[in-house]
């Protein structure tokens, strides 16, 4: 714990001393339109934000940050999961996230609130171009009174962070404290979303408190994001907010209201050593800061899931049918995992598998059966990448449903095989999906932030539909001697090209896609690609957390 305090002090020194690495403080302060400052609404619901960016996570990330800072005002707010469950039960969630108009009066009656906050996220992260030097976050938000549908407050604001900058704020401090828990992209998004929402909330009219005002929280960070915490490991938590308050943190359902100590004014620290029987497949951290009278603010974690438990070590060779389940998760593959011909490996919903260095070679049959509420998650243990999933010579009915794959050299690779990939997410891999002499269907999936191409195919028969291919550094699609039907997708903001075809046979049909522009010819489409007609607006797509 002493080392953690020292790290915070050093981080504070770095942040406050880095005057040349500041947020663009010379930009104009946000100028809101405030329609009412008296008799403000009391109970407010922050609705799911519509995502107008190429980053499918943007709506979720920015909404959580907005909620975190909003909770320090004197409004009574509903927790986002309560709002979302109610909207989904009444078939309104997709309309809200899709930016469709929904009556504030109807929402007020449904949610039991005086006002609702609508938001359109217009940017988050880095935009690929010939030359760029900054990352940005932008939001258009408005609070609307439910009784008469009249606006109370509205603001559109965008902030920029210079490449490599650390904002001179507690957000920059907190991102530095546990920088080893975040990759560069996550840290950039965290900083940008935090600065944006903090600035916007500062412009919002605040009703007089019915008692004392809730204490302000500026950030909560921890060292558990994207890691496997085993017995003997320690979860370390830091919350920064108002001084001389009562701070607690929770990791439901494993840990509830664990106290934090104020080591420095406004810097609260908590820790928990993992016990032998502790197990949590996908936890989310929550921090609460209260006054002595019990008035509190809550911070929802935006860093990522926490996975806890002694792993079940998988054998190197699967020689008979084998089923992985959430009950024995997380699983650990120490070296390589080989599924022999004629053998089926099944991963049921909620399964978590960690790979130390190599990957999984399936010569038999693969079934990954995640659900929206309990996806299957495959990732590397530690910072080193793993090799990924390799389907080798399997003509069985292989399927991957609701699976998140990250940190691999190949998120998925198939050779002389058949595969159906549905509702999956491949993020932060070197190559997203690679098909060689194979037949594959990719439906409702996200292929994003690959170091090379998102989807590559050679001598393959490929269908890609209802998916998002974006922010892949080299390009979106790389196709050679392949037959491909690519339709009803968002394909944009990839590095050097959106689609590149290496042969001239012209067997790539890519009509009815959204390219981020109404004129696809302006995008990088290389080779014989039939891309007309194009969609005039993006498909609606939501990520699975």
Image (cartoon, helix red, strand yellow):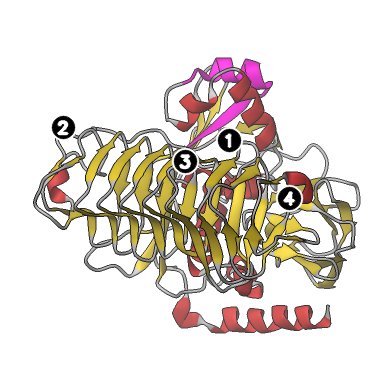
Which percent across, then down, holds residue 109? 64, 15
- Residue where numbered disc 1 is placed: 37
The answer to which of 382 and 158 lies nearer the viewer is 382
Magenta segment range? 102-120
Q: Is residue 203 visible?
A: no
The answer to which of 107 and 291 lies nearer the viewer is 107
**Residue 281: numbered disc:** 4
Mark 4 / mark 3, whichever is N-terminal = 4
Relative vertical location of residue 466 with respect to residue 58 in this rendering, above or below: above
Q: Quadrant of residue 314?
A: bottom right
- Residue where numbered disc 2 is placed: 533
Name the residue located 40 percent from the left edge and 71 percent from the top edge: 162
Mark 1 / mark 3, whichever is N-terminal = 1
Query: Is disc 3 placed on a helix, strand or loop?
Result: loop
Local crowd size for mark 4, using a 10 Å CA cut-off: few (<14), some (14–19), many (≥20): many
Name the residue located 56 percent from the left edge and 42 percent from the top edge: 367
- Pair 4/2: label in front: 4
Q: Are marks 3 and 2 in contact (CB under 8 Å)?
A: no
- Pair 4/3: label in front: 3
Which percent across, then down, holds residue 307? 72, 57
Question: Would residue 146 be found to the left or right of residue 485 on screen?
Answer: right
**Residue 122: numbered disc:** none
Question: Would residue 240 be found to the left or right of residue 440 on screen?
Answer: right
The answer to which of 55 and 170 lies nearer the viewer is 55
**Residue 396: numbered disc:** 3
Q: Is residue 119 magenta?
A: yes
Q: Quadrant of residue 409?
A: bottom left
């Amino acid at each position: 714990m002493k080392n953690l305090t020292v790290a915070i002090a050093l981080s504070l020194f770095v942040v406050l001393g880095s005057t040349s690495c500041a947020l663009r403080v010379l930009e104009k302060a946000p100028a809101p339109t405030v329609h009412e400052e008296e008799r403000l609404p009391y109970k407010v619901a922050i609705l799911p934000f519509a995502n107008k960016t190429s980053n499918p996570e943007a709506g979720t990330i920015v909404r959580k940050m907005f909620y975190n800072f909003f909770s320090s005002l004197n409004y009574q707010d509903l927790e986002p999961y309560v709002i979302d469950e109610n909207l989904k039960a009444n078939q309104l969630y997709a309309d809200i996230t899709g930016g469709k108009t929904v009556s504030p009066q109807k929402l007020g009656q449904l949610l039991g609130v005086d006002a609702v906050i609508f938001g359109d996220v217009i940017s988050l992260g880095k935009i690929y171009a010939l030359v760029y030097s900054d990352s940005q976050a932008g939001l258009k938000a408005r609070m609307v009174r439910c009784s008469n549908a009249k606006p109370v407050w509205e603001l559109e604001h965008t902030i920029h962070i210079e490449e490599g900058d650390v904002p001179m704020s507690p957000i920059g401090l907190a991102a530095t404290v546990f920088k080893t828990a975040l990759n560069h992209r996550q840290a950039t998004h965290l900083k940008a979303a935090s600065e944006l929402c903090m600035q916007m909330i500062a412009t919002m009219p605040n009703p007089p408190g019915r008692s004392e005002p809730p204490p302000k929280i500026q950030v909560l960070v921890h060292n558990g994001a994207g890691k496997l915490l085993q017995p003997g490991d320690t979860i370390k938590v830091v919350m920064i907010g108002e001084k001389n308050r009562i701070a607690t943190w929770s990791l439901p359902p494993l840990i509830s209201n664990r106290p934090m100590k104020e080591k420095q004014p406004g810097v609260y620290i908590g820790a928990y050593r993992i016990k032998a029987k502790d197990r949590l497949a996908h936890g989310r951290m929550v921090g609460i800061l209260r006054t002595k009278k019990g008035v509190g603010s809550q911070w929802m974690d935006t860093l990522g899931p926490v996975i806890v438990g002694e792993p079940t070590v998988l054998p190197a060779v699967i020689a008979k049918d084998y089923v992985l389940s959430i009950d024995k998760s997380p699983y650990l593959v120490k070296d390589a995992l080989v599924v022999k011909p004629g053998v089926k490996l099944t991963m049921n919903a909620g399964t978590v598998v960690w790979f130390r260095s190599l990957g999984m070679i399936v010569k038999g049959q693969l079934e990954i059966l995640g659900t929206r509420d309990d996806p299957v998650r495959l990732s590397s243990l530690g910072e080193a990448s793993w090799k990924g999933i390799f389907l080798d010579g399997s003509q069985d009915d292989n399927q991957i449903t609701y699976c998140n794959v990250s940190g691999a050299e190949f998120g998925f690779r198939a050779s002389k095989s058949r595969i159906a990939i549905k509702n999956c997410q491949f993020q932060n891999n070197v190559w997203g999906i690679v098909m060689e002499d194979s037949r594959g269907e990719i439906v409702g999936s996200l292929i994003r932030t690959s170091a090379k191409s998102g989807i590559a195919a050679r001598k393959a028969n490929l269908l890609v539909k209802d998916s998002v291919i974006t922010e892949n550094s080299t390009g979106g699609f790389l196709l050679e001697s392949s037959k491909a039907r690519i339709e009803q997708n968002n394909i944009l903001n990839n590095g050097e090209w959106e689609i590149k075809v290496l042969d001239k046979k012209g067997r790539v049909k890519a009509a009815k896609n959204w390219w981020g522009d109404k004129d696809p010819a302006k995008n990088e489409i290389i080779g014989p690609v039939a891309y007309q007609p194009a969609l005039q607006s993006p498909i609606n797509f939501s990520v699975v957390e």
